[in-house]
Image (tube, rainbow, N blue to C red):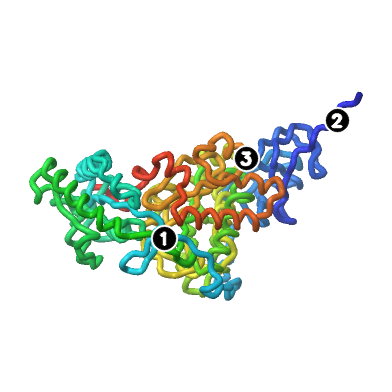
Amino acid sequence: MTEPASKAPRVIRLAADDNVIVAVDQIGQGASIAGVTAQARIPRGHKMAVTPIASGEPVRKYGQVIGFASQPITPGDWVHEHNVAMGDFARDYRHAEDARNDEVLPPELRATFEGFVRPNGRTGTRNYVGILTSVNCSATVAKFIADAVNRSGILNDYPGIDGVVPFVHGTGCGMASRGEGYDVLQRTQWGYATHPNLGAALMVGLGCEMFQIERMKSEGHLVEGDHFQSMTIQAIGGTKKTVAEGVERVKAMLPVAAKAKRETRPASEVVLALQCGGSDGYSGITANPALGKAVDLLAKHGGTGVLAETPEIYGAEHLLTRRALNTTVGEKLVERIRWWEDYTTRNRGEMNNNPSPGNKAGGLTTILEKSLGAAAKGGSSTLRAVYEYAEPITERGFVFMDTPGYDPVGATGQVAGGCNVMCFTTGRGSAFGCKPTPSIKLATNHYVYETMTDDMDINCGDVLDGVSLEDKGQEILDKVLKVASGERTKSEDLGYGELEFVPWQIGATM
């Protein structure tokens, strides 16, 4: 009896003029695929050349340049960092040429979810009480207050409150009192203090720090009352007195926060943060473009999708400027790219410091390749606004926020801007959660979904098996609306979210 022929490894050619293909399955050395013979083993998610590429010539994937051959590459070669390098190339931004009038459904046809309507009219998807800190010196006291309330059992009397969360950080003093670093921290603190996923907030300071609470209240027009209060350790009289006072203040806030009840709200109130971490060679093929389809659907229902991580759209920004609403929006994105080029240069870094070792093990070779896949999270809708880090997000539809690519820092900025739900794609298996904004984890492949099933909410690996991006996008949007209505995510069940509050620290620590 003859043995059945083994199944040929699957491959994908993402654009007609690509000179590489992507291995869906591992390709063994000597295998004949797409008319060429593999000259080496090609790991899953990695690239194989299908045409000769001379030294110095561009390597193309997605129909775009992802790098340049650092040595001659022959058909069948494994294409990765040993034979591909970064290089400068011209990008024609062509602002707004692909802008369009995106369809937005009339209110009566929009999807809905069950959310918390706040006094200012914004809608939350969770109902936490937050304890903010103006400086690292008050971090321990904030944690003591939260722990005391959470251990007391009093929250059992308030099932509509999701918990008391301390948002502590490592800065707030030893910094300049003016400039980028201070402005970023102030916007972040203001954004959390007024976030729609918080039913109430208490801010705790030391008293003598550079980041003064009274200044933040004045410049941010924050008024103390039932939903927001502040105090300092020095004014109250030390650690024990401040903890006791803080516990009493939080207990008084609980019935105030508990008054909020879920009610039917339109999907236009969803502000969805788009994140990716631990990316791999499948990210730009499965989870990211599927999330992009969900963003297009959300925009159609009047909602907002917020792409971020500026270093991870580097090399793909020209595709976004073409979708900009107008030249002003496109030029603002390019200005942020130029800022990053200067920022990395003056700190003796480089934009291609990204991808990480894990990204490379998963098949990504350069930041250009990673960026082209990451930008797919933004779908195809018109880019309507570009925001600086932690700026309040006011425009609906598809927008961009300037943040680092480091996930906790980027996510913190998006949440501070008002994002009330998050979708987080991962190909290597990122362990991440976020409070007060629930994070939905999307696995790019079956392996990560099955091996990290306690962390992953949606498996996008079935896109490789024939599920359409459109169907997967609808599945993602349906999940977003369920989570917005109170369904818990895997990271919430695991208890993630407190330590992932990481404001972007810019400037010297003095």
Disc 1 marks a residue whose amino acid type is Gly
Give the mark, 1 or 2, whose residue is nearer the N terminus. Answer: 2
Q: Which of 57 and 499 lies nearest the eye of the viewer?
A: 499
Please state if 161 lies on the left or on the right of 115 as rendered. left
Q: Quadrant of the N terminus?
A: top right
User: Label 3: how many residues lie within 10 Å, few (<14), some (14-19) or many (20+)?
Assistant: some
Disc 2 secondary structure class: loop
- Nearer to us in this view, 476 or 31: 476
Mark 1 near mark 2, Cβ–Cβ under 8 Å?
no
Instruction: Answer left or right for 443 relative to 18.
Output: left
- At label 2, counting other C-alpha atoms closer than 10 Å, the crowd grade (few under 14, some 14-19, many 20 or more) is few
Q: Decide if residue 223 is on the left or right side of residue 396.
A: left
Q: Residues within 10 Å of mark 1 (few under 14, many from 20)?
A: many
**Residue at 72 percent of width and 39 percent of height:** 77
Relative to the observer, which residue lies in front, 336 or 461?
A: 461
Residue visible at 40% across and 53% down in the picture? 437
Mark 1, residue position: 115
Residue named by callout 3? 446
State which tag comes first along the sequence, 3 or 2. Answer: 2
Nearer to us of marks 1 and 2 is: 1
Residue depicted at 54% across the width and 47% down the height: 442
| Residue that sits furthest to the front in the current view | 157
Percent across and percent down for residue 211 are 21, 55
Point out which mark residue 213 bears.
none
CA distance for labels 3 and 2: 25 Å
User: Which residue is most to the top?
Assistant: 1
Name the residue that disc number 2 marks.
4
Q: Position of residue 358 (x, y in %)?
A: 53, 38
**Between marks 1 and 2, how big is the CA–CA gap?**
56 Å
Residue 274, given in percent of the width and then of the height, sits at 49, 55
